[in-house]
């Protein structure tokens, strides 16, 4: 080895050691264990459970990340400490990874609740025992319960139907309050038919009032799922003077748009009725032209359950 190479070699070794030292000193080494937190970054599909069942983590993602930072963090294999045989008093489960802990809120119930929200098409008008919620109650399994929170003549805006007063809009009534107290897991909402009869006054506030109602339900019932029901057709010249064209051209598009904007399930009764041969005589009461026949009530109940039975909430 020549003299020049001998002089370069120690310098190269020193530089190599410095580089290795620098690579080993990454940013995580400067943080302590207490600087990190465990976070549920993707919530599971199900948040509501029947008593004595087990927590289902399907769809859940948990990461270890720096507190008060924008870091994504490291995805970790976690355990659930108290997720079996859930009891009615339990409001959360504990997620664990090494010494880290976090909690996830859940709800535990004796039965799941479906709340049917609407006007006389929901309440059943003069035939409440033949309403679609009554038929639905007969179709659901024993761990489900159905509540009818429809009111004859009610509307989104308070205009149309039985009233001409914004104080009579659905959100201001006891039926709305009772529907919240019912603590539903699924909301089947069909409102708007009556607004069509007072559309000149209802139109300016209809969309905003519908948004207000939906937001109120979402804020109060964060785990609940919603089925937006597109109002069905009425027969021209019906007993109540409810204009079919206004429902079709004004009300129905708003209902569809709200379902899309909010990621709701949609049950388009306008479309499904009109695709049925002789739907007026089959589904609409004679000398009435608006309310459901028993055949229609049974059909609507079947379709609501078709959607509801697969929902995770």
Image (cartoon, rainbow, N blue to C red):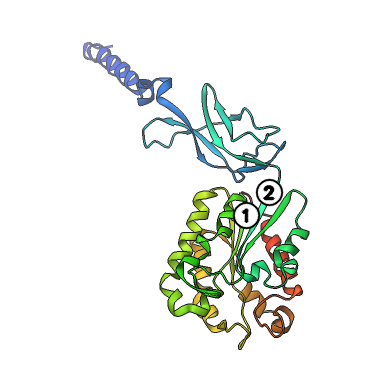
Tell me residue 112's x, y (percent): 68, 49
Tell me residue 150's x, y (percent): 62, 64
What residue do we see at 47% from left, 78% from top?
A: 199
Quarter the N terminus occupies:
top left
**201 or 92, which lies in front?**
201
Q: Secondary structure at mark 2?
A: strand
Residue 162: image quadrant is bottom right
Q: Residues within 10 Å of mark 1 (few under 14, many from 20)?
A: many
Residues marked 2 and 1 touching at CB (< 8 Å): yes
**31 or 182, which lies in front?**
182
Q: Residue extending furthest bottom?
A: 237
**231 or 127, which lies in front?**
127
In this view, 28 is above or below 142: above
In this view, 158 is above or below 246: above
**160 or 135, which lies in front?**
160
> In the shown orientation, is residue 8 left or right of residue 177?
left
Tell me residue 229's x, y (percent): 60, 67
> In the shown orientation, is residue 200 left or right of residue 98?
left
The residue identified by callout 2 is 112
What residue do we see at 69% from left, 83% from top?
A: 280
Q: Residues within 10 Å of mark 2 (few under 14, many from 20)?
A: many
Q: Secondary structure at mark 1?
A: strand
Q: For the residues marked 2 and 1, what is the alpha-carbon distance in whole angstroms?
A: 8 Å
Earlier residue among tags 2 and 1? 2
The residue identified by callout 1 is 186
In this view, 211 is above or below 113: below
What residue do we see at 71% from left, 53% from top?
A: 145
Tell me residue 2's x, y (percent): 25, 12
What residue do we see at 74% from left, 48% from top?
A: 143
Residue 108: image quadrant is top right
């Amino acid at each position: 080895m020549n003299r020049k190479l001998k002089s370069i070699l120690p310098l190269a070794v020193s530089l190599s050691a410095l580089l290795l030292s620098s690579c080993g000193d990454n940013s995580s080494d400067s943080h302590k264990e207490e600087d990190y937190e465990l976070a549920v970054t993707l919530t599971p599909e199900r948040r509501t459970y029947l008593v004595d069942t087990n927590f289902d983590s399907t769809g859940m993602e948990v990461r270890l990340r720096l507190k008060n930072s924008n870091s994504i963090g490291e995805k970790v294999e976690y355990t659930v400490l108290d997720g079996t045989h859930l009891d009615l008093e339990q409001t959360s489960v504990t997620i664990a990874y090494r010494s880290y802990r976090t909690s996830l809120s859940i709800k535990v119930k004796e039965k799941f609740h479906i709340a049917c929200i609407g006007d006389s098409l929901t309440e059943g008008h003069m035939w409440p025992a033949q309403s679609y919620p009554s038929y639905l109650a007969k179709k659901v399994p024993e761990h489900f319960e159905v509540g009818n929170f429809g009111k004859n003549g009610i509307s989104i805006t308070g205009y149309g139907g039985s009233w001409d007063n914004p104080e009579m809009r659905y959100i201001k009534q006891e039926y709305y309050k009772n529907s919240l107290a019912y603590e539903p897991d699924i909301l089947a909402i069909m409102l708007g038919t009556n607004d069509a009869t007072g559309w000149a006054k209802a139109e300016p506030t209809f969309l905003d009032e519908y948004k207000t109602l939906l937001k109120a339900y979402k804020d109060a019932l964060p785990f609940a799922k919603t089925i937006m029901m597109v109002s069905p057709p009425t027969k021209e010249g019906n007993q109540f003077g409810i204009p079919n064209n206004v429902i079709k051209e004004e009300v129905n598009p708003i209902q569809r748009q709200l379902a899309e904007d909010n990621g709701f399930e949609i049950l388009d009764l306008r479309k499904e009725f009109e695709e049925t041969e002789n739907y007026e005589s089959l589904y609409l009461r004679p000398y009435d032209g608006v309310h459901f026949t028993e055949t229609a009530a049974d059909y609507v109940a079947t379709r609501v359950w078709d959607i509801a039975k697969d929902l995770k909430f």
